Image (spheres, rainbow, N blue to C red):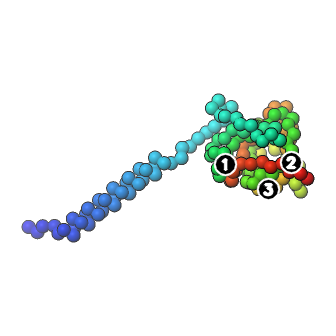
Amino acid sequence: MKKPSLVKYTILLAFFLISASQYLTAQESESELELAIAITPDNKGLEWLACPDFLPCTFAILRGELGGNDMDIYLKFPSKADIPFHTHTSTERMIMIEGEFETTYVGQDRVTLKKGDYAFGPAGLAHDGYCASEKECIMYVGYDSPLDAVPYEK
């Protein structure tokens, strides 16, 4: 009876080690996956933070962290609040959750956002706002780069 050669054992051992390594790597990747989330604006676990002094609002971080890229927030304005012109370093992707919100971007017509409406604000383009509803205005806002707000003089 012929004995298996050392080369065959070596190949088998290498195959086993590669397979085990791929399995362990896949297990590590699965455990590092970001968890799915679903959060409503009235969630008791949200921490509402103050906006910069010149803006009458609060915000709650849904995903990401202050000072980091790729952050999602809820933004809340009191009823009838006037928001002065300002800019952001980041683009803004907004969806109205509650209320009615008017905004003007410099050089563009004023628009009114209602529940479910989407708006996009380019980075650096000055805009103002007004919460026109009898109840507070709440919107979802997504940012690409760190959240900031800088007053703008016309």
Instruction: Calculate the distance from the C-alpha at mark 2 to the C-alpha at mark 3.
Output: 11 Å
Mark toward the start of the polypeptide (2 vs 1):
1
Q: Residue 67 — which label?
A: 1
Name the residue beneath numbered marker 3.
124
Q: Position of residue 100 (x, y in %)?
A: 82, 39
* Looking at the image, residue 84 lies above or below residue 22: above
Can you name the residue that lies furthest to the right here? 154
Above/below status of 96 relative to 106:
above
Question: Residue 12 is drawn in which quadrant?
Answer: bottom left
The answer to whether any part of residue 102 appears in the image is no
> Which is more toward the observer, 60 or 11?
60
Residue 40 spot, x, y in % from top left: 66, 35
Residue 119 versus residue 47 in the image, above or below:
below
Q: Residues within 10 Å of mark 3 (few under 14, many from 20)?
A: some
Numbered disc 3: secondary structure? loop
Q: Label 2: which residue?
A: 85
| Badge 1: residue crowd in 10 Å (few <14, some 14–19, many ≥20) | few
Q: Nearer the viewer, mark 2 or mark 1?
A: 1
Identify the residue at horizontal 81%, vertical 38% (top origin).
56
Q: CA distance from mark 3 to mark 1?
A: 17 Å
